[in-house]
Amino acid sequence: MSIRSNIEALQNELSAREVTLVAVSKTKPNEDILEAYEAGQRVFGENMVQELVTKQEALPQDIEWHLIGHLQSNKVKYIASFIAMIQSVDSLKLLKEINKHAAKNNRIIDCLLQIHIADEEAKFGFDHAELIEALRDESLNDLNNIRIRGLMGIATNTDNEKHIKEEFYELKMLFDGIKVSFFRKTDSFDTLSMGMSSDYPIAIEEGSNMIRLGSTIFGKRVTKHFKSQ
Ligand SMILES: *Cc1c(COP(=O)(O)O)cnc(C)c1O
């Protein structure tokens, strides 16, 4: 299967649903990204700042870039001028830093709060208590150059579908609860990013409206890079 036919198959599969496809192009060369682009794909996800910046400069300017990997505060400045969405916000401090650089660029940057839903210790993200604490913080009201669009989560890497389903179910419940409690008056809290190549059908069943697919579109990545994400 070619990248083009993979994109077309996914477009067909998703057309009846309101699910946004993020093509995760980390480690993949520009020619692969262009092939997806020419098949109509416009939203791409990267997890490393340096790689993202290099690709953004070289590739068509109407690509909507999402950062999906851990972001250090001191690197926000490199992406603030162009990034469409930062899906991996995991602290209030980072949110403030994004706001600062968005303001410098006269932009409003869309953000998702990453929630830790997996069993694995190593994954980043807020736990429930930290999330509530951050959302209650008064200083959030002053952040006029970011828009919190929703939540993002990565399920446990396991073959146990029931377990994955439970994690996605919990994240959807959290999303609904947070929306009612903190974002009742805004329409823009509308995005639940969950589901990767191995588990996106389950994620969609459980209420995801944004999936992040790498290997389904571009083929397998080199294992080494995948682990050091
Ligand atoms: C790499 C990555 C993906 C895509 O993974 P695939 O299994 O190749 O679909 C999705 N989300 C995040 C956060 C990633 O780092």
Image (spheres, helix red, strand yellow):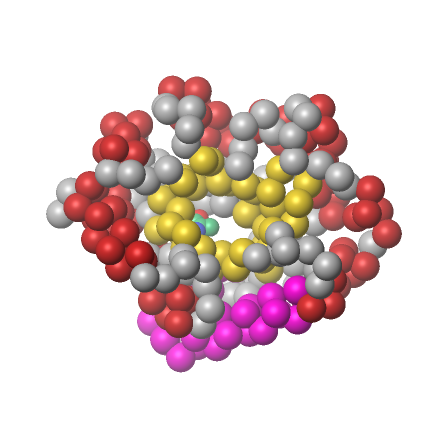
**x, y percentage for residue 224?**
35, 43
Q: At 30% across and 34% down in the image, what residue appears?
A: 37
As rendered, which of 83 and 199 lies closer to the eye? Answer: 83
Q: Locate residue 129 relative to residue 29 in the image: left or right.
A: right
Does the magenta portion include 175? Answer: yes
**x, y percentage for residue 137?**
83, 54
Q: Is residue 64 above or below residue 69?
A: above
- The residue lying furthest to the right in this view is 138
**What span is in magenta?**
152-179
Q: At 81% across and 47% down in the image, what residue appears?
A: 141
Q: At 46% across and 30% down in the image, what residue appears?
A: 52
Task: Count the marks.
Answer: 0
Quadrant in which residue 99 is drawn: top right
**x, y percentage for residue 176?**
61, 69
Residue 199 in view, yes or no:
no
Does the magenta portion include 161? Answer: yes
Q: At 24% across and 55% down in the image, what residue appears?
A: 12
